[in-house]
Amino acid sequence: MNLKEKYTEQAIWDMIAQIPDPEIPVITIEELGVLRKVEVLKDKVIVTITPTYTGCPAMKMFEDDILKTLHDNGIENAAIKMVYTPAWTTDWMSEAAMQKLKDYGIAPPVKGTQDKGVLFGSAPKEVQCPQCGSKNTELKSQFGSTACKALYQCKDCLEPFDYFKCI
Ligand SMILES: [Zn+2]
């Protein structure tokens, strides 16, 4: 039996959809919007992903995790296809994922304010503190625990927190 007879695209999707983000383990690659497409060929599975942004160090981990999960499920021949257009935007992130980020202590991206400028220096206007909800926050560093996040501090509860940058 070849792969195409054995697996539907949905079956492969379900197999890998729950893989957590290597940096934010409470959120899955499906919720993040990184997982785009699954193709099942006779002898090969092709998984299409769109990086959150070019050069994000987590992408290599995504690739490894997807290939390992497929391998663990008996699919030896799999490939990852990176697609950069249309570019990933935070709008692809589900509402549930936004809430999980917040619960995890990371301020979720402010929807509708996606601005490439955030990556190059200008800060978004209002970032809400995930601890107390205050909008009285300030940017401490363009780079938080990873390049995809910025470090903020709340001026009310004084808690530092990561903000997931909008792109
Ligand atoms: Zn606060």
Image (cartoon, grey):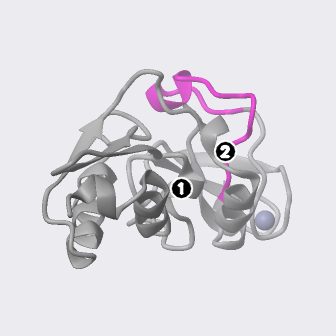
Front residue of 166/64: it is 64
Q: Quadrant of residue 98?
A: bottom right
The type of residue carrying mark 1 is Glu
On the question of residue 105 being in view, the answer is: yes
Q: Nearer the viewer, residue 23 or 86?
A: 86
Comparing labels 1 and 2, the label whose residue is closer to the camera? 1
| Element on which disc 2 rests | loop
At x 39% / y 55%, what residue is drawn? Answer: 146
The outermost residue toward the bottom is: 72
**Residue 109 falls within the magenta-colored stretch:** yes
**Residue denoted by label 2:** 109
Eyeballing the image, is 126 above or below 5?
Answer: above
Q: What stretch is highlighted in magenta?
A: 107-124
Left or right side of 137 for 54? left
Quarter of the render that holds ligand 1: bottom right
Residue 62 showing in the rendered view: no
Distance CA(mark 1)–CA(mark 2): 17 Å
Q: Residue 30 carries which label?
A: 1
Q: Image height check: is 88 above or below 8?
A: above
Q: Would you call the spot at circle 2 few (<14 residues within 10 Å), some (14-19), or many (20 or more)?
A: many
User: Which quadrant of the rendered structure holds the N terminus?
Assistant: bottom left
Q: Where is residue 62 in the image (x, y as percent from the top left)?
A: 32, 57
The correct choice, above or below, for 152 with respect to 1 in the image is: above
